[in-house]
Image (tube, helix red, strand yellow):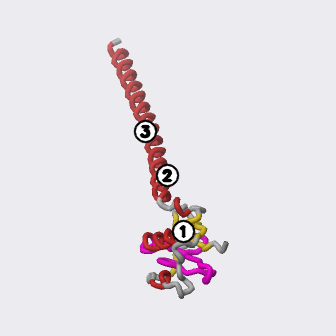
Amino acid sequence: MENGVKALMIAAAVLITIAIITLGVIVFQSGQEAASQAQKGFSDLQNDMATVQFSAYDQKTVSGSQVMNAIRKYATNPQFGVSVKTGKNTTGIWYGKVVSSLGVVGAAGVTDLSNAYDDAHVDYVNPIAQFKSQLIYDSNRVVRAIVLTQKTS
């Protein structure tokens, strides 16, 4: 009889141990899932914050002085380009890096802004002219370029 009681106690201890381990695994899995969701949410927030600085150039009309500010501010970024198409140079010029329409960063563009200030040059940016802006994104939805096209009318 004494052996039977001991066997029942050992069986009960084993079942309780299994129940505790199962509970621990369930808690760990739910915590891991919550952490994964939080990490994704943080990543999305970080992408939104990185993009918000370019919101002034997202399908907006900007002045020539804002174009010059964008060139000075963003063209020094090693993975970024600013394309400016003026009334005299409709093909445009890239400041910083040349970026494809798919957001692939390529060769170095122009770094000297003197032609943008020279009103006799085709790349002159008239401070009171109006430009239509457009953002170029890469495959990860990161802004890689701003394209600014002068309005003709």
When asked about the image quadrant of residue 46, the answer is bottom left
The region drawn magenta spans 74-102
**Element at badge 1?**
strand
Q: Nearer the viewer, residue 95 or 15?
A: 95
Residue 108 seen in the current view:
no
Question: Alpha-carbon neighbours of circle 2 within 10 Å: few (<14), some, or many (≥20)?
Answer: few
Q: Which of pointers 2 and 1 lies earlier in the amino acid sequence?
A: 2
Q: Residue furthest top?
A: 1
**Element at badge 2?**
helix
Where residue 132 appears, x then y in whole percent? 60, 68
Q: Quadrant of the N terminus?
A: top left
Q: Which residue is mark 1?
A: 63
Q: Quadrant of the C terminus?
A: bottom right
| Residue in view at x 39 percent, y 24 percent | 16
| Residue in view at x 42 percent, y 74 percent | 76
Distance CA(mark 2)–CA(mark 1): 31 Å
Q: Which residue is mark 2?
A: 44
Circle 3: residue type: Gly
Mark 3 or 2, closer to the camera: 2
Circle 1: residue type: Ser
> 72 left or right of 121?
left
Circle 2: residue type: Asp
Where residue 45 appears, x then y in whole percent? 47, 51
Residue 141 seen in the current view:
yes
Q: Nearer the viewer, residue 26 or 11?
A: 26
Q: Which of pointers 3 and 2 lies earlier in the amino acid sequence?
A: 3
- Residue 31 image label: 3
> 130 left or right of 115?
right
Distance CA(mark 3)–CA(mark 2): 20 Å
Where residue 112 appears, x then y in whole percent? 44, 83
| Residue in view at x 59 percent, y 64 percent | 61
